[in-house]
Image (cartoon, rainbow, N blue to C red):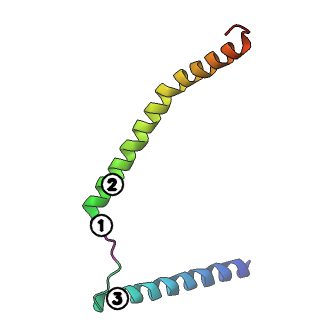
């Protein structure tokens, strides 16, 4: 029972070391003036995210309204193929 606790502790120590190394790298980049910021601002990011959410909602509405008409069109196609004179 001692081994799993020891193993978990080792994993946590490695994660802490990794995060400290990453933080130090970010600090060095910041001091050098090479921040790894994105090319868009937070406000633009929020705007794009909101637009994406709106597009998803509109797409779902379109699917909801188009699905019945598509089913009718498919059904009409099947009935015209089945009738010999049609």
Q: Which residue is at the front of the view, 38 or 26? A: 38
* Position of residue 68 in the picture relative to residue 52 (left or right): right
In this view, 21 is above or below 39: below
Magenta segment includes 40 = yes
Residue extending furthest toward the front: 85
Of the image marks 1 and 3, the number of the one nearer the N terminus: 3
Cα–Cα span, label 1 and label 3: 19 Å
- The x and y percentages for residue 27 are 34, 88
Of the image marks 2 and 3, the number of the one nearer the N terminus: 3
* Position of residue 30 in the picture relative to residue 19 (left or right): left
Asked if marks 1 and 3 touch (Cβ < 8 Å), the reply is no
In this view, 63 is above or below 85: below
Asked if marks 1 and 2 touch (Cβ < 8 Å), the reply is yes
Q: Which residue is at the front of the view, 27 or 43? A: 43
Residue range of the region highlighted in magenta in the rendering: 37-41
Question: Judging from the image, what secondary structure is the residue with disc 2 in?
Answer: helix
Task: Identify residue for label 3.
Answer: 29
In this view, 79 is above or below 56: above
In this view, 43 is above or below 12: above
Residue positioned 56% across, 85% down in the render: 13
Magenta segment includes 86 = no
Task: Identify residue for label 1.
Answer: 40
Quadrant in the rendering for residue 86? top right
Residue 63: assigned label: none
Q: Main secondary structure of the magenta part?
A: loop
Residue 48: assigned label: 2
Residue positioned 68% across, 13% down in the render: 79
């Amino acid at each position: 029972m001692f081994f799993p606790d020891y193993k978990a502790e080792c994993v946590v120590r490695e994660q802490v070391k990794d995060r400290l190394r990453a933080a130090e790298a970010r600090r060095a980049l910041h001091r050098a003036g090479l921040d790894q910021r994105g090319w868009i601002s937070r406000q633009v990011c929020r705007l794009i995210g909101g637009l994406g959410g709106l597009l998803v909602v509109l797409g779902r509405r379109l699917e909801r309204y188009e699905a019945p008409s598509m089913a009718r069109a498919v059904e009409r196609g099947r009935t015209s193929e089945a009738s010999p004179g049609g």
